[in-house]
């Protein structure tokens, strides 16, 4: 049996966690994605959205705020220096908070 390197394990865990986050956040009031439209949206980080498909690739429509947010891994600096990745549904991944209005 081949022993996977640490980087491969981290990549596998990250991919699994990202999938978990997308699946768990999708039903949080982001609207109905059941349309036949498969185009990627144009809304950027902080822009209003009604469903995930409204946001540009790599973003998610956050329920409650109905704003596009970027996914991140808890405990990392992916959101920028001094900006804490906020957890979503007790997962190990979350979203970058939007700046105050």
Image: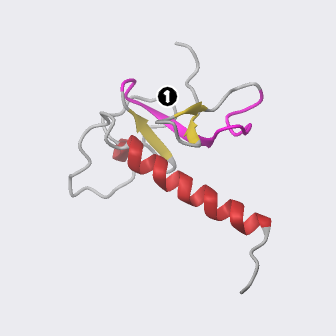
The foreground one among 78 and 21 is 21
Question: Colour scheme used in the picture?
Answer: secondary structure
Q: Who's the residue at 49% across and 28% down the image?
A: 46
Report whether 96 appears left or right of 25: right
Q: Is residue 80 magenta?
A: yes
Q: Who's the residue at 40% across and 41% down the image?
A: 25
Q: Which residue position is annotated with label 1?
A: 46
Prevailing secondary structure class for the magenta stretch in the rendered image:
loop
Q: Is residue 68 magenta?
A: yes
Place of residue 41 in the rendered image (x, y in percent of width and height, measured from the top left): 39, 46
- Mark 1 neighbour density, 10 Å: few (under 14) some (14–19) many (20 or more): some
| Residue 84, image quadrant | top right
* SS under mark 1: loop
Place of residue 93 in the rendered image (x, y in percent of width and height, measured from the top left): 57, 43
In the rendered structure, which segment of residues is drawn in magenta? Answer: 64-81
The foreground one among 69 and 90 is 90
* Residue 61 in sight: yes
Report whether 60 appears left or right of 100: left
Report whether 42 appears left or right of 92: left
């Amino acid at each position: 049996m081949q022993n996977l390197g640490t980087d491969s394990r981290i990549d596998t865990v990250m991919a699994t966690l990202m999938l978990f986050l997308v699946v768990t956040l999708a039903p949080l009031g982001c609207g109905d994605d059941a349309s036949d439209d498969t185009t990627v949206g144009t809304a950027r980080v902080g822009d209003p959205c009604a469903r995930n498909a409204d946001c540009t690739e790599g973003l998610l429509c956050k329920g409650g705020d109905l704003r596009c947010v970027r996914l991140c891994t808890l405990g990392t600096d992916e959101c920028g220096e001094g900006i804490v990745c906020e957890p979503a549904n007790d997962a190990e991944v979350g979203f970058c908070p939007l700046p105050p209005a």
